[in-house]
Amino acid sequence: MLIKKILFPAITASLLLLSGCATPKMDYTDGPSAMGGINSQYAVLGYEGDIKPFDQIGIVTTDGDIQIHAIDGNPIALYRTFKIKGFYPAGRFQLHLQDGIHLITAGFEIRANPSYWSTSDLTVPVVVTRGKVVHLSVLRDGKKWSINQTDGAAALTLIRSDFETLSKNQ
């Protein structure tokens, strides 16, 4: 009787609380869309030459909180960029890269109430594979932060659609 009245509800409540505390898996779709000019949207070609088909490159995405500042030590401003500029700079971001291990240097800024941001950049190795998507998101632990890398393949259809829109606008 004790098990049914006390322990079972306590265990159930604990499991529900713990599952609610788990970090949700984030991907490209969690970044705000251009939404009629409110948010910005970006695509950067991290290679020289013409636009390559999706099956010849890999893609790195962010949800808008992470700002990539450099690729393999080169400032991101040196690369060909497609942009839909909105009122807010945050938005969906995709970086097209050739196969290999690339060093990505990034910071973060989260515009919420309250807002918070990184005071220094991190450089992390990212393994890029043709036809694959790596999604970068912010992991915070008190005053420290790091970059989480997850499989972003579930958003590939939206990534392609956004890129088509971005490349037509340039």
Image (tube, grey):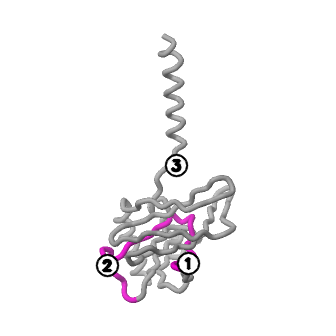
Task: Identify which residue is drawn at 50% across, 34% down.
Answer: 16
Magenta span contains residue 51: yes
Image spot of residue 127 (x, y percent): 43, 69
Task: Identify which residue is drawn at 67% across, 55% down.
Answer: 113
**Is the residue under label 1 in contact with that under label 2 (CB below 8 Å)?**
no
In the rendered structure, which disc, 2 or 1, sits on the residue that comes first in sequence?
2
Residue 53's disc number:
2
Image spot of residue 115 (x, y percent): 67, 60
Q: Which residue is mark 3?
A: 23
Q: Amino acid at mark 1?
A: Ala
Q: Secondary structure at mark 3?
A: loop
Q: Residues within 10 Å of mark 1 (few under 14, many from 20)?
A: some
Magenta span contains residue 123: no
Judging depth in this view, the residue of 93 and 87 nearest the camera is: 93
Q: Secondary structure at mark 1?
A: strand
Measured in 3D between alpha carbons, the distance from the residue under mark 2 to the one under mark 1, in whole angstroms, is 23 Å
Residue 118's disc number:
none
In the rendered structure, which disc, 1 or 3, sits on the residue that comes first in sequence?
3
Q: Which residue is mark 1?
A: 70
Q: Which stretch appears magenta?
A: 49-72
